[in-house]
Image (spheres, rainbow, N blue to C red):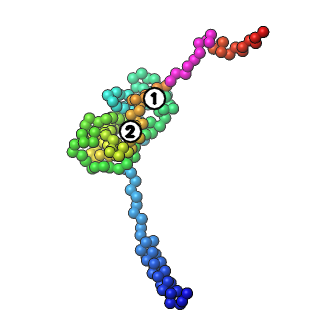
């Protein structure tokens, strides 16, 4: 290779390297805004959780022994219930869709598809209205009663909470054998003669 071609290539590398160093590497990355909280309460402050969906309602209450169905006082199935209170301490929204809305019917919020009320030990209540699923099927439109912003909440969150109505977390009794069936179940078979 000739000296002239080598010199031109060296100058080009220096110019490109200088541009990358001065302009590209010194750009400060834009801070990514985290998704806003829809609301946020402490797990230990939860006292009562009310869920309304499809015209049905279930109310759950925290007792010293654990969570129970408020009406029957039956305990909830812990295998199904364990994460529910944590979900209701405050979902992180996908984003704020609008700062305020004029027509709640447009988003399925009048009447809402679901209503969740979280009552705290202090007596404060937070009521959430869950509306239609967004056209892409990823989120629900949602709003806290008494608050103007319209949020997008992951559809999976709403589905899990609505399932408390569709399939209540009731303890399934373990089948037991009658005493005479139990006695015969554990007898060893007699050998044939």
**Residue 138, image x and y in percent?**
38, 45
Secondary structure of the residue carrying numbered label 2: helix
Residue 176 on the magenta span: yes
Quadrant in which the C terminus appears? top right
Q: Name the residue under label 1.
A: 169
Of 68 and 8, which appears nearest the observer? Answer: 8
**Residue 2, can we see it?**
yes
Quadrant in which the N terminus appears? bottom right
**Which disc, if any, is residue 101?**
none
Write down the region rendered in magenta. 172-181
Give the number of callouts. 2
Residue 55: image quadrant is: top left
Residue 18: image quadrant is: bottom left
Residue 61: image quadrant is: top left
Q: Main secondary structure of the magenta part?
A: loop
Q: Check contact, mark 2 vs mark 1: CB within 8 A.
A: no
Image point (62%, 12%), residue name: 181
């Amino acid at each position: 290779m000739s000296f002239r071609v080598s010199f031109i290539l060296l100058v080009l590398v220096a110019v490109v390297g200088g541009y990358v160093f001065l302009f590209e590497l010194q750009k400060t990355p834009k801070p990514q805004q985290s998704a806003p909280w829809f609301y946020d309460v402490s797990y230990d402050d939860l006292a009562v959780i009310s869920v309304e969906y499809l015209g049905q309602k279930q109310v759950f209450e925290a007792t010293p022994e654990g969570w129970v169905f408020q009406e029957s006082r039956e305990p909830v199935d812990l295998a199904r219930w364990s994460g529910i209170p944590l979900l209701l301490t405050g979902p992180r929204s996908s984003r704020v869709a609008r700062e305020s809305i004029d027509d709640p019917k447009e988003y399925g919020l009048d009447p809402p598809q679901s209503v969740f009320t979280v009552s705290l030990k202090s007596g404060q209540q937070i009521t959430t209205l869950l509306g239609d699923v967004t056209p892409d099927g990823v989120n629900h439109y949602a709003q806290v009663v008494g608050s103007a912003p319209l949020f997008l909440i992951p559809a999976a969150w709403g589905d899990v909470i609505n399932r408390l109505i569709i399939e209540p977390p009731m303890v399934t009794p373990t089948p037991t054998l009658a005493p005479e069936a139990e006695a015969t179940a554990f007898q060893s078979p007699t050998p044939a003669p």
